[in-house]
Image (cartoon, helix red, strand yellow):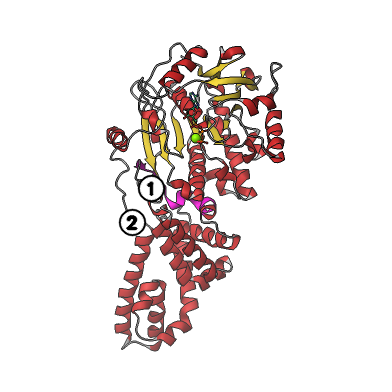
Amino acid sequence: MTSDIFIGGGGPDYGVKQHLSLGYANRHGLVAGATGTGKTVTLQILAEGFSKAGVPVFLSDVKGDLSGLAKAGTETHKLHGPFTERATQIGFTDYIYEAFPVTFWDLLGEQGHPVRTTVSEMGPLLLARLLELTEAQEGILNIAFRLADEEGLPLLDLKDLQSLLVWIGENAKALSLRYGNVSSASIGAIQRRLLVLENQGGTGLFGEPALALSDLMRCDAQGRGEINILAADKLMASPGLYATFLLWLLSELFEELPEVGDPDKPKLVFFFDEAHLLFDDAPKALVDKVEQVARLIRSKGVGVYFITQNPADVPDDILGQLGNRIQHALRAFTAKDRKELRMAAETYRENPAFNTEEAIREVGVGEAVTSMLQRKGVPGIVERTLIRPPSSQLGPISKKERAEVMAASDMSGKYDAPVDRSSAYEILKKRAEDAAVEAAKAEEEAEEGSPQLREFNAARRYTGGRVARSTSRRGKTRQSQSLGGAVATAVIKELQGTTGRRIVRGILGGLFKGR
Ligand SMILES: Nc1ncnc2c1ncn2[C@@H]1O[C@H](COP(=O)(O)OP(=O)(O)OP(=O)(O)O)[C@@H](O)[C@H]1O
Ligand SMILES: [Mg+2]
C-alpha cells in the first residue's frame, strides 16, 4: 500500500522526489502563495494523491476551476507539452491522464447536491457569528435555543427560528422575569439579520434532509477516496456564510468521528480555500475555537489544509499546527511584504543549499518551497520543489459534464428535494390556531359565565400568541390587565412539562457548547 503522496521533484535539477507522508497527513498543512503562483493546481494534485490513496477529500472550489478533477486530462490540452516536460524533469515516469471520483455539493443547491444543516445543529455561537450579532443579541439567541430545547420545539429551518423569535417577542415580559432583559430592539435586530441571511441564500442551507457526514467519507468501487467539491464561487459573495459553514462542518466532524490517534492515513482531508476569510475580523473567542478544533480534530484522523495567499493571514497559534507546507512565491514589494516574507522563511528548517527567504521570492509558477513532516513528525528540511502536473483536466468541466456527474452520483436523489417536517414553526402556528379556536369558544361561553371565568378565558387567549391576539375583537382592557400573570404561568407550566427533553443536539458539542 502507498504510504505517501508524490508531490514533485526537489534537490538539484528537481530530480529528487518529494512526498507527503500519509501517516502525518492528519497533522495539517498550508498551501500559500501570491495570486497565479500555482496554489489551485497544488490543491488539485494533492486531492488526486489522497483520492488514489483511498482518502476521501473535501474541498471548496472558490473559482470554479477544480471541477476538472472529474475528467481526465488530454493530449489535446494546450498544456500537454509543458506538463509532460515537467513530468520528465521530476522523474514522474508513470504520469498518466485520469479522472477521479467527484461529488459536487452546493449550499445554494445549483451546481451540486444541496448541502443542508439544521439551525439547532449550527448552534447559537456560530449562528451569532453568521448573523454578526452583538453580545446582547447573542444573549437573546441563546435564550431562543434554550426555550426550543425546553419546550420541545425543533429548530430546523430559518422559519422555525423566525417564528420562535416572534413568540419570544410576544412573551418578552414573562421571559424577562426568567432570563433577564429580553428587549424587543434586540429581537428586531436579529430578525433583520435573518432577512439578510435569507437574501444571501441562507434559506436553502437550513433544513432537511441534513447532510450526513458519512456521505463525505465515501470511497468508490476501486477504493479511491471520493473528492467532494463544494461550489463556492457564488458563495464567496457572502464570506461570512462561507467561513461559518466550513467551520461548522469541521466542528461536526470533530463531534461525530471517533478518536483514532495517529492513523496510517487520514479518514478525511479537508481543504479550506481562502482561509483568511475565517480570520478576517474574527473575534478572539472564535479564533481560539478554530485553534482548538484544529488541534483536536487531528486525533480523529482529519487533516485540515489551509489555502491562502499569505501565511501572515493565519494566526500564529494555528500556523504553528500546520505541519506540511507548500509555500509558493510571495511578492516583496513593500517593507511590510519583506517583513512578512522574512517571518514566513524563519518558520522553516533551513537547507544549506539555498537561502529560504530568497527561494520563496524566486520560485517560479508551479514551483514551491516545501517542507513535509517526516519520521516522528519532525518537519523536513526545506526544499525547492517543482510541483507535479495534474492527471485530471486543468480548468473547469462544462455545465453539461457537471450535470452528468451529478446525475450519475449515488448522492443523486438523496438530498435534492427538501423535506419540511413539523418543527417549531408548525408547532407554534398550530398552538396559536388552537388557542384562537379555544379563545373564541371560551368567549362565547363567557357571555353567560361569571366575571372570574370571563377574565380567565380572556387571559388564556394570549398564551397562543399572535393569531389569538389578531382575531380577538373584544375585551382589550381585561386582557391587558391579566396578561403578565397569565403568560408567566403558562410559560412556567410548559417549561416544567418539558424539562429534561433534549432536542437541541450539538450546539457544537464539547467545543462550542461550553463557552
Ligand atoms: N504543478 C503545476 N504543473 C504545471 N503547471 C502549473 C502547475 N501549477 C501551476 N501551473 C500553471 O500555472 C497556472 C496558475 O496556477 P494556479 O491557478 O494554480 O494559481 P493560483 O495560485 O491558484 O492563482 P490564483 O490566486 O489566481 O487562484 C496554471 O493554470 C498552470 O498553467
Ligand atoms: Mg487559485
Q: Which residue is mark 2?
A: 422
Q: Magenta region: which residues?
A: 112-127
The residue where tag 1 is placed is 108
Percent position (x, y) of residue 63? 45, 39
Tell me the kind of residue under disc 2: Ser
Task: Give the residue drawn at x 48%, y 41%.
Answer: 249
What is the crowding at mark 1: few (fewer than 14 residues within 10 Å), some, or many (at least 20)?
A: many
Badge 1 amino acid: Leu
Examine the image and state in which quarter residue 28 appears. top right
Q: Is residue 221 left or right of residue 342?
A: left
Question: Which percent across, then down, holds residue 449?
Answer: 33, 87
- Of 376 and 68, the residue lying toward us: 68
Q: Which x, y percent locates residue 382?
A: 65, 21
> What residue lies at 69% left-to-right and 19% top-to-bottom?
354
| Number of dots carrying numbers | 2
Q: Position of residue 322 (x, y in %)?
A: 61, 31
The reply, left or right, for residue 4 in relation to residue 336 is left
